[in-house]
Image (cartoon, rainbow, N blue to C red):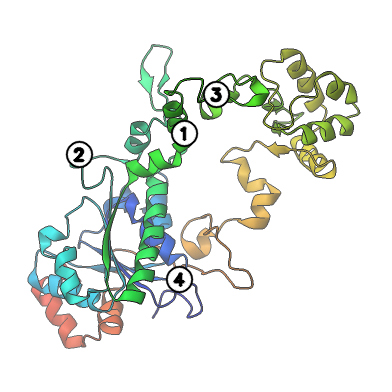
Amino acid sequence: MESAAPGAPLAGLRVIEFSLLGPGAVGLHLADLGADVIKVESPQGDYIRQMTWPIIEDSSLLHWHIHRGKRSLTLDLKTEEAKDVFRDLVRDADVVIEAMRPGALAKRGLGFEDLREINPRIVFCTISGYGMTGPYADLPSHGIAYDTWAGLVKPGYTEDGLPFIPEHPSVGIHAGPLFAAFGVLAGVTRARETGQGCFLEVAQSDASAAMDWLRSETFKAYERPESEVTGNKADNYERRAPGTAGMTTGVRYQIYESSDSHILFMASEQEFWKNFCAGVDRMDLFDKWPGSKFGDHAKDNMELRKILAEIFKTKTTAEWVIWSGEHNTTIAPVNTPETLAQDPQFIDRLGFMSYETHGADMIPYPVKFLGEDPVDPTPAPTAGQHNDEVLEEVLGYTAEQVASLRQAGALGEGR
């Protein structure tokens, strides 16, 4: 059986994934678009199933999410028989993903140079923590490391003065696989045109830095003299701190309390500011502080900030969001990871795939192909769940050949 309907965007794309933990999300993005992703794992299985919390029916949410839509084949690549099976998989595949330390497959005689002799069109992608080069290349690491390395996480401190990891969105562990999936599809496109595959590598640390480019590039820009690099016109060209740090003292672009939670006010354009003032019948505020046409946050205007704070307390967040649409101004809800599920925009656009059909309640793939039904991924597999299916249906092995592989230990004990 194929993992998706024939009409899926990536139907017909076959991916052989050799992954451990979070980097296996490269295959997730491809499977979510209909690719046939075969996860090759050791007979013991990827220990992602027991990594972090929550544990849902004996497997982690991390596993349910990252390996949905995939098939699992257990191979003991210490045996020559299992290596032969891997080579047979690659013969008609489009992509091989090595989602662990670079060179893991090469050590087994299954690296890019080995596999391209079998399939010159193969696109080989290796994704790791710090990449294949540099002084950190061989360091073991986990996902938060890439964000602390890239400067995304500011340490918190306890009352006793001990530093701790603060709550924060993870970036590198998610962005790295996205960049990798994008690169993989670029490689496949070229391979289908030229008949030649390629070897690409992605570091999740690089992805963290790339996603936070605005702050890093701003600091770099500020190394140049102020005669060449300034702030914007609305701030009298005064340099502000990079990224959101420069918005702490903003007023027309700021978080405010509503009557029941919080809203984000974003009237940095003069047009939206004027529409807001007219809508709340306070044109006196616009007359007194009209601001610049673009990018004006009314920085440090505490008098205005206190007035707006009182105004925003007069409605609920939901009322302000509806009101902003009616008056063509910029107000957004401030959700939490818990309240997001009740937001009407989330419910309309995303919602959750149900645990009853997918093993866990999960946010679906966010890209929509208009006029087409989205791919409905199968639940994440148990280790070796598809051994017979892959060997017999994908590779065409006979029952006798499969039995012989089991006897040789190629599939692991009990398989």
Q: Measured from the top left, where is residue 11 in percent x and y?
A: 44, 76
User: For mark 4, what is the residue?
Assistant: 34
Q: In the rendered structure, which amino acid carries the disc numbered 3?
A: Thr
Q: Quadrant of the N terminus?
A: bottom left
Q: Secondary structure at mark 2?
A: loop
Q: Which is nearer the eye, 300 or 159?
A: 300
The Cα–Cα distance between marks 2 and 3, rounded to whole angstroms, is 39 Å
Q: Nearer the viewer, mark 1 or mark 2?
A: 2
Q: In the rendered structure, which amino acid carries the disc numbered 2?
A: Leu
Q: Earlier in the sequence, mark 4 or mark 1?
A: 4
The Cα–Cα distance between marks 1 and 2, rounded to whole angstroms, is 23 Å
User: For mark 1, what is the residue?
Assistant: 168
Q: Give me the residue at 64% from left, 56% from top.
A: 349
Q: Earlier in the sequence, mark 1 or mark 2?
A: 2
Q: Nearer the viewer, mark 3 or mark 1?
A: 3
User: For mark 2, what is the residue?
Assistant: 139
The Cα–Cα distance between marks 4 and 3, rounded to whole angstroms, is 48 Å
Position of residue 213 relative to residue 234, above or below, is below
Q: Earlier in the sequence, mark 2 or mark 3?
A: 2
